[in-house]
Image (spheres, grey):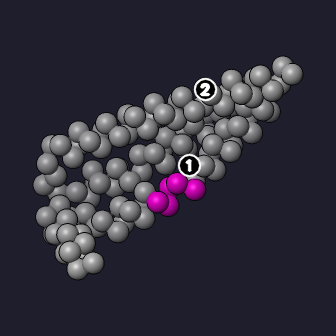
């Protein structure tokens, strides 16, 4: 346990990022993300706009990385590469989930 505590403190000192804040944002955004999925499905069923749920899902997906980019100092280039890759993949995944939910709702409506 001491090793992990020291490692997290080293991250804080070297990069200026509080790993607990990063983790809290990452974990805290998860229930909000699922809430936006619920709103997305509800709006699809009611044939309402899905703009707000999709934007909310995207913001939840990138929120911890926005903190990393704003608060971070001396971050190696690979960190930016990994974060950008995760964000792009997350947004792609959100898009795919939205399309899947839309097809599911459309098939339920036609039955």
Tag 2 near tag 1, CB within 8 Å: no
The answer to whether residue 72 is visible is yes
Q: Does the magenta stretch include residue 71?
A: no
Q: Residue furthest right?
A: 111
For the point 68% across and 23% down, the residue is 103
Residue 73 placement: quadrant: bottom left
Does residue 48 appear in this view?
no
Toward the top, the furthest residue is 110
What secondary structure is marked by label 1?
helix
Q: Identify the secondary structure beneath mark 2.
A: helix
Q: What percent of the width, then of the height, locates residue 43?
A: 73, 36
Query: Is residue 29 found left or right of 19 in the rendered image?
Result: right
Q: Tell me where the magenta segment starts and ends, as one range.
A: 27-31
**In the image: residue 73, left or right of residue 96:** left
Residue appearing at x 54%, y 39% in the figure: 55
The residue at 50%/61% (across/down) is: 28
Q: Name the residue under label 1.
A: 33
Give the prevailing secondary structure in the magenta stretch. helix
Residue at image position (52%, 35%) is 94
Q: Mark 2 points at which residue?
A: 99
Residue 20, by quadrant, is bottom left
Question: Closer to the N terminus: mark 2 or mark 1?
Answer: 1
* Mark 2 residue crowding within 10 angstroms, few (<14) / some (14–19) / many (20+): few
Q: Where is residue 93 in the image (x, y as percent from the top left)?
A: 48, 34
Q: In which quarter of the image is the C terminus?
A: top right
Q: Does the magenta stretch include residue 29?
A: yes
Q: How far apart are marks 2 and 1 (CA)?
A: 16 Å
Q: In this view, does 64 lie above or below 83?
A: below
């Amino acid at each position: 346990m001491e090793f992990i505590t020291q490692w997290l403190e080293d991250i804080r000192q070297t990069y200026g990022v509080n790993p607990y804040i990063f983790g809290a944002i990452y974990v805290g955004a998860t229930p909000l993300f699922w809430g936006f999925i619920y709103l997305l499905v509800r709006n699809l069923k009611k044939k309402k706009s899905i703009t707000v749920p999709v934007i909310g899902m995207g913001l939840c997906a990138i929120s911890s990385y926005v903190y990393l980019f704003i608060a971070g100092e001396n971050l190696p280039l690979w960190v930016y590469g990994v974060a950008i890759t995760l964000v792009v993949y997350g947004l792609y995944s959100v898009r795919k989930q939205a399309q899947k939910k839309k097809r599911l709702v459309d098939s339920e409506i036609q039955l």
